[in-house]
Image (cartoon, rainbow, N blue to C red):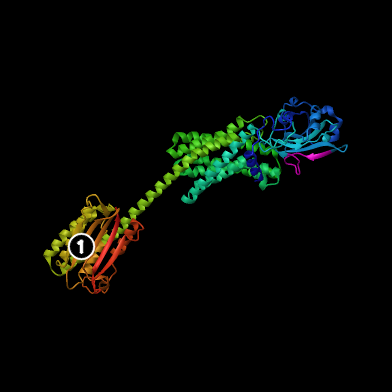
C-alpha cells in the first residue's frame, strides 16, 4: 500500500519535465544505449566465455523469432559514446526492460562481479518505475563498466514471448521514478478515476445487498473488488503488499481476471434470472462458469509443475473461448430480450467483453502482457459499471415495487381473512337471535327479522370482495344491523347516526364493517344490562386532520358492570369480534391512538356508559 501512497504524493506534487527542471536538461531527457545480443540454449555459457568471444553478439534486428522461456540471452550494453557524460554527472541511472530472470555483470576491483536484476530473482537491485509495468531502473557508476565501456546482462523472458527488437536501454542523470512527465501524468489519471468509481459502485452494491438480501448485488460487489485488484494491483503495489514472492505475484495477478469473470457470471445469472427466463442463456453462462473454474484449476496445476509455457497458452486459449461464448450469448440475448433488464445486462456485458479485445489489439508491440494497455480495460469496465449503475438502480426499483405489491397483497389478504372472521361471528349472533324469536313463537317478528337479515347478508356478501366500503354503504349496513337488533330486543334501546357536514360520505372509504363489533358490544354488554334510565346509542362520524373520527357512544352500564355477565343475552364464551377488529386496525398502521375506549362517569363516580373512538386514515 506504500506504493499507492507514494503515487498519490507524486501526483499531488507533480513536476513536469520542462526546461529548467533538471540541472542538465539534455541528459534528463534520456539517451539510448547501443546494445547487442547473443542467444544461448541453457546455462552452458559463463561470463568468461562471453568475454572471450565478443564476436558472438548480434544486432537486435538480426533476430526474427520471438523469445522463448527456455532461452537465455546475453546482452552487451555499449556506454562508449556516453562515458564523458557519466563521468560529469553527479548521478547516473540505467533504464531497462523488466526481465523475469536476470543478472548484471560489472567491474569491481579489477574483477567481474554479479548482481540480480530479474523481477523473479531474490535480492534484485532493480526498481520498477511506477508509471510503467514494462521498465525498471538501477543506479550506475562509471567505475562499474567493464573495460571502461560495457555492461553485460544475462536475462530470461518467461512470462510471455517477446520481440528482441522491442528491448530498450536508456541512460538518465535523474532517477526515472523521481518525476513525472505530462504523458506519465495522463497515464496515471485513469487508474485513480477507476479506483474512485470502483469504490462508489462497491459501496452501493454492498449496501443494496444488505438492504434487499439479493445475491446478485453481493456477486457484483465481489466482481468489482477482484477487477479493481487485477487492474490496479501492480500499479498500487497491492500484490507486493501481500506477497513477497514476485514469481507467485505474477501467477496470482494473471489469475484474478479469471476470478473476476467467475464472479461476473454468478452476478449475470442472478441479475437476469436466466434459469427461469432465459434457459439457453443460462446454459451458456454455465459453460462459461465451468470454463473459468477449469482454467483456475489448470493454473494451480501448472504452477505446481512450473510450466511457464503451459501457463501462457492456457490463459491465451481460455480467453479466446470465453470471448466467443460470451459474444454469442449476448447476440442471442439482444434478439430475445424480454425487457430493460436484458438490455442493461447485454450492453454492459458487451462493453466488458470488447474491452480486453481492444486492450490486445491496441497494445504497444513491447507490451507482451498487455499491462500498459490496461487503460482499455479501465475504459470498458468503467462503461460497464456506469451502465449497471442505471441497471442496478432499475433493478432496485423493480424489487421495491415488487415488495410493495407483495405487502399490499398481504395486507389485502390479511384484511379479508380478519373480516371473514367477523362475518361468521355476526351471522352466528343473528341466527341465535332468530332462534330466540322462534323459541318464543313470535312469527311476525321472526319473519320481519329474517327479511332484514337476508338483505343485510346479501349486502355483506356483495361487498366481500372489497377491503373498504364507501361511508354511505357502511352507514346503511349499520342501520340495517341496528334495526335487526332493535327488533330482536323489542325496541329496548334507541340509536342515532350522525355524519359531520364537513365529511362527504360519498367520497370517503372506511374498512368494511369495522364498527359492527363495537356497536354489538355496546348493545349486548352496555345497553341491555341496564335496568333503569335512557338506553341510547350514538354513532358519530367526524373529520379530523387527514383522519376520520368514528365514535360509538352508549349510555350503558359501563365495562366494569358488563364484565359481571348478568344479562340473559350474554354468552359465556369469549367474543372474537373486538379482538379481530383490533388486529384490523393495527394492520392500517402503527398509530397507538387508532383505537381508544373511554369509560364515562358522573361526579359521584357512577358509570354513564362507554365511548369507543376509532381514528381511520383518510
Quarter location, residue 264: top right
How many numbered marks are there?
1
Could you tell me which residue is drawn at 79 percent across and 40 percent down?
Answer: 115
Residue in the picture at 26% in, 74% down: 564
- Could you say which quadrant of the image residue 144 lies in? top right
- Residue at the image point whose x is 20% and y is 72% from the top: 530
Whether residue 616 sits left or right of residue 28 in the image: it is left
Q: What segment is highlighted magenta in the picture? A: 113-126
Instruction: List the single residue furthest toward the right.
Output: 110
Front-most of 361 and 140? 140
Decide if residue 397 is in sight here: yes
Q: Position of residue 343 (x, y in %)?
A: 46, 36
Q: Is residue 182 left or right of residue 264?
A: right
Q: Residues within 10 Å of mark 1 (few under 14, many from 20)?
A: some
**Farthest residue, direction top:** 62
Q: Position of residue 529 (x, y in %)?
A: 21, 72
Task: Give the x, y percent position of residue 104.
Answer: 79, 37
Q: Is residue 295 visible?
A: no
Residue 307 x/y as whole percent: 70, 40
Name of the residue lying farthest toward the left: 444
Q: In the picture provided, is 584 more to the left or to the right than 199?
A: left
**Between 52 and 300, which is closer to the camera in this rendering?**
52
The secondary structure that most of the magenta stretch takes on is loop
According to the picture, the residue beneath numbered tag 1 turns out to be: 538
78 inside magenta stretch: no
**Circle 1 SS class:** strand
Q: Is residue 117 in the magenta section?
A: yes
Amino acid at each position: 500500500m506504500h506504493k499507492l501512497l507514494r503515487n498519490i504524493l507524486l501526483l499531488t506534487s507533480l513536476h513536469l519535465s520542462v526546461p529548467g527542471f533538471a540541472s542538465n536538461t539534455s541528459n534528463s531527457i534520456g539517451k539510448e544505449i547501443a546494445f547487442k545480443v547473443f542467444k544461448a540454449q541453457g546455462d552452458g555459457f559463463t561470463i568468461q566465455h562471453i568475454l572471450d568471444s565478443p564476436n558472438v553478439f548480434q544486432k537486435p534486428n538480426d533476430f526474427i523469432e520471438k523469445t522463448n522461456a527456455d532461452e537465455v540471452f546475453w546482452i552487451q550494453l555499449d556506454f562508449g559514446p556516453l562515458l564523458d557524460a557519466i563521468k560529469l554527472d553527479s548521478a547516473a541511472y540505467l533504464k531497462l526492460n523488466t526481465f523475469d530472470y536476470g543478472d548484471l555483470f560489472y567491474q569491481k576491483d579489477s574483477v567481474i562481479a554479479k548482481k540480480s536484476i530479474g523481477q523473479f530473482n531474490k535480492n534484485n537491485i532493480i526498481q520498477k518505475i511506477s508509471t510503467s509495468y514494462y521498465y525498471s531502473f538501477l543506479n550506475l557508476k562509471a567505475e562499474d563498466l567493464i573495460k571502461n565501456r560495457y555492461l553485460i546482462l544475462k536475462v530470461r523472458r518467461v512470462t510471455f514471448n517477446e520481440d528482441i527488437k522491442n528491448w530498450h536501454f536508456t541512460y538518465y542523470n535523474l532517477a526515472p521514478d523521481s518525476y513525472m512527465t505530462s504523458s506519465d501524468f495522463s497515464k496515471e489519471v485513469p487508474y485513480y478515476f477507476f479506483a474512485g468509481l470502483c469504490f462508489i459502485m462497491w459501496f452501493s452494491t454492498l449496501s443494496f445487498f444488505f438492504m434487499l438480501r439479493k445475491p446478485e448485488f453481493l456477486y457484483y460487489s465481489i466482481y468489482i473488488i477482484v477487477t479493481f485488484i487485477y487492474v490496479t494491483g501492480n500499479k498500487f503495489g497491492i500484490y507486493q503488499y501481500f506477497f513477497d514472492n514476485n514469481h507467485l505475484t505474477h501467477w496470482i495477478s494473471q489469475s484474478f481476471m479469471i476470478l473476476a469473470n467467475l464472479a461476473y457470471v454468478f452476478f449475470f445469472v442472478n441479475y437476469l434470472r436466466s434459469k427461469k427466463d432465459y434457459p439457453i442463456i443460462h446454459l451458456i453462462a454455465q459453460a462459461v462458469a465451468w470454463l473459468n473454474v477449469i482454467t483456475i484449476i489448470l493454473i494451480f496445476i501448472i504452477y505446481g509443475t512450473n510450466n511457464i509455457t503451459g501457463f501462457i497458452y492456457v490463459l491465451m486459449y481460455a480467453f479466446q473461448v470465453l470471448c466467443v461464448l460470451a459474444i454469442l450469448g449476448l447476440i442471442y440475448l439482444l434478439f430475445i430480450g424480454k425487457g430493460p433488464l436484458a438490455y442493461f445486462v447485454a450492453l454492459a456485458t458487451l462493453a466488458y467483453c470488447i474491452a480486453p479485445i481492444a486492450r490486445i489489439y491496441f497494445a504497444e508491440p513491447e507490451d507482451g502482457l498487455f499491462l500498459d494497455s490496461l487503460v482499455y480495460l479501465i475504459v470498458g469496465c468503467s462503461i460497464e459499471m456506469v451502465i449497471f449503475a442505471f441497471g442496478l438502480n432499475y433493478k432496485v426499483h423493480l424489487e421495491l415495487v415488487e415488495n410493495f405489491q407483495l405487502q399490499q397483497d398481504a395486507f389485502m389478504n390479511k384484511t379479508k381473512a380478519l373480516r371473514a372472521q367477523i362475518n361468521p361471528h355476526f351471522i352466528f349472533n343473528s341466527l341465535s337471535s332468530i332462534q330466540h324469536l322462534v323459541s318464543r313463537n313470535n312469527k311476525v317478528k321472526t319473519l320481519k327479522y329474517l327479511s332484514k337479515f337476508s338483505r343485510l347478508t346479501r349486502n355483506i356478501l356483495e361487498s366481500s370482495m372489497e377491503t373498504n366500503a364507501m361511508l354511505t354503504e357502511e352507514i346503511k349496513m349499520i342501520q340495517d344491523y341496528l334495526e335487526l337488533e332493535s327488533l330482536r330486543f323489542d325496541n329496548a334501546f334507541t340509536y342515532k347516526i350522525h355524519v359531520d357536514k364537513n365529511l362527504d360520505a360519498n367520497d370517503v372509504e372506511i374498512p368494511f364493517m369495522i364498527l359492527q363489533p363495537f356497536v354489538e358490544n355496546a348493545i349486548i354488554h352496555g345497553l341491555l344490562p341496564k335496568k333503569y334510565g335512557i338506553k341510547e346509542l350514538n354513532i358519530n362520524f367526524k373529520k379530523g386532520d387527514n383522519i376520520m373520527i368514528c365514535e360509538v357512544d352508549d349510555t350503558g352500564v359501563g365495562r366494569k358492570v358488563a364484565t359481571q355477565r348478568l344479562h340473559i343475552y350474554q354468552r359465556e364464551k369469549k367474543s372474537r369480534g373486538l379482538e379481530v377488529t383490533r388486529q384490523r386496525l393495527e394492520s392500517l398502521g402503527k398509530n397507538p391512538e387508532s383505537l381508544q375506549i373511554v369509560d364515562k362517569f358522573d361526579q359521584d363516580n357512577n358509570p354513564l356508559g362507554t365511548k369507543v373512538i376509532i381514528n381511520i386514515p383518510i
